[in-house]
Amino acid sequence: MSSHSNRRPHNHTADSRRTAPAGGPRLLRLVAGALLVAYTGFIAVLLVVSLLYVRPADFAAVIRSADVRHAAWLTTWTSLLSALLALGFALPVGYALSRFRLPGRAVLDTLVDVPIILPHLVVGVALLIFFRTALGRAIQGLGLAFVYAPEGIVLAQFVCVSPYAVRTVKAALDAVDPRIEDVARTLGWPAHQVFLRVTLPMIRNGIVAGGVIAWALAMGLYGPLMVFAGTTRSRTEVMATSVYLELSVGRIGPALAIAILLVLFTMACLLVFKRLAGRTGSLW
Amino acid sequence: MLRVEHIGLHLGSFALKDVSFEVRRGQRFVLLGPTGCGKTLLAEIVCGLRALDAGCVRLNGRDITRRDPARRNIGYVPQDYALLPFKTVECNVAFGLEARRLARAEVARRVGEMLELLGISRLAARLPRHLSGGERQRVTLARALVIRPDLLVLDEPLSALDEGSGEETIALLRTLQAELNTTTLHICHRLEEAFALADTMGLMRDGALEQVAPPPELLSRPRSRFVAQFLRLSNLVEGEVRDLPEGRAFCVDGAVWTRTDRPGGPARAVVPLDALSLSPATPPDEPRQVVVADVIAENRPCALRPFVRLGGRLRLTVPGAFPAGAWTEGRTAYLAVPRDRLHVVPEGPAEPPERTGGPGGDDLVG
């Protein structure tokens, strides 16, 4: 503290601004602002550098390639389906976790988070092992092969991304004032109607956010897919897998081209969903 | 008419114990008590939002204890209003009517009427987040009343409002009561609110009802020290109940003030304010000599309220308007207290609660 403020009585007028310590709000704004610019700038730089590295010839070849087009189509429908399935489960599961007083709730809660904590590769391995068991074989006997098949992509994506959807939906449900639902019931609406007419509209943003997060994550998965669904060109090769495969044989140019395509596509869809999400500036 | 019988509920370390009371048709029953005494729990039980361990709830003669909250026809106004944030005022008010499958025209008509009655027609198209506290209060009332409930449950309706809005709301609630004659269970913890609105009051403490009576009854004949203290009765004389040869009597400083059948030991007597008279000269009727201790001027001009000290153990506020200069500190005066109007309150906890008085009550009378 400067000796000035010790000698004079503390006076809450214009004086205090001159003698205020240097570590005030202005410094905080500068530091936070600078970090924001550095952070977003770094991401922007990564994108720009990648864009500039790609040769137009590589990009053209990639767009023309039938295999890449198939991989793009596969990526799109599998990630969309797994996101929808994740949401489908996230609603009842999130509701149960949020509203019911379950015995062993902490255990259930932790189990939901396991796919997030496990390395995704391990998820793929675990699925592979499961389908070697008697139960797994029985399920395969019902018609869907899963292992080294496109439906396996959906399954692996689903397992990896559904925890995020569940968490987002549960957080949205936790934020709903239970009193509002209570009053709706006293006004004459049965419980399931209250869920449809009161709860759902209030968690709409959370549902959209959960779906988008799940879908965006699914678009970028390749580890568990390679282990579980294989990398058969034009059958189980998604775009992310293509990027990895091209890199592994040293073809950085084409790898980057596919990656850029994937990034552009993902960002475009994210922007569309942001519009759909409504007034809130961010998804979560 | 609402009848609550022997309600019991255990919640962790808290318990509602054998709570019973009755709200007659068209009456306003105020459930009063300090925070944490179980009033909101009771409201939730009556509305069906919480299960009970024991007892039953009857509305208009029918047992609704096990009935779904959606089928009780109770208008619930919670403390934090709980309006649907994504619906306009109009849609919020209509929400309960829609559940009853009424024709759209009928719904619109009733909503319009209710908005008019509550003076919020101009807010019909607004969203709750653009309303002030008082306005939200009215919307919530409208929503609860438009369904024509058999019972209206108000949980601390004034607690979130500033003083001005609070007074407006009290006036509004009185008007609504007169117009609609709705049976009301009103929960609060503030005395002013309770006394302004109650037909009958129930005082709660720690999950049990201490006393149920109309306000004048509570003020003049509190059953226990808690009731007297909670109602901030300042006209209490400390003394003790002694067993004398001629019977039990309440005594102050050794002098017998009145006969009583209360248990022996330390006690207080409620001195009814309207029966007090303070005079400078010896009045005819068993006076106590007092010294005027503090003279406080009220907001009204020329009104003085002498505090009188009696043997160091009594402070009484003598109501009334006295001309300025009539009483000065240290002056001797005489306080006349009619014996038969004294009500003795024991120091210990109340005996099992009784319903004292109330219009046409057929219950025990203390």
Image (spheres, grey):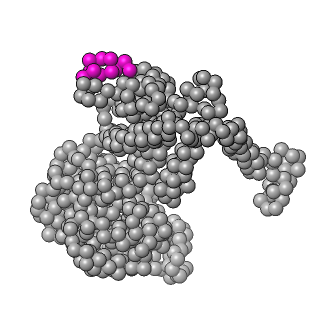
Q: Nearer the viewer, residue B70 or A198?
A: A198
Residue A76, horizontal then vertical, whole percent: 45, 42
Residue A266, horizontal then vertical, whole percent: 54, 44
Q: Residue at x 24, y 44 (%)?
A: B9
Residues shaded magenta = A128-138
Rendered view: A267 above or below B320: above
The mark total stands at 0
Q: Is residue A130 magenta?
A: yes
Q: Nearer the viewer, residue B272 or A69?
A: A69
Q: Quadrant of residue B95?
A: bottom left
Q: Residue at x 84, y 53 (%)?
A: A19
Q: Is residue B295 magenta?
A: no
Rendered view: B62 above or below A42: below
Q: Nearer the viewer, residue B175 or B346?
A: B175
Q: Residue at x 54, y 45 (%)?
A: A265
Residue A147, horizontal then vertical, whole percent: 36, 24
Residue A10, horizontal then vertical, whole percent: 80, 55
Q: Report whether residue B213 is seen.
A: no
Left/right placement of residue B297 relative to residue B267 reads right
Q: Where, quadrant-wise, is the C terminus of chain B in this rendering?
A: bottom left
Overall secondary structure of the magenta section: helix
Q: Nearer the viewer, residue B214 or B154?
A: B154
Q: Report whether residue A142 is seen.
A: yes
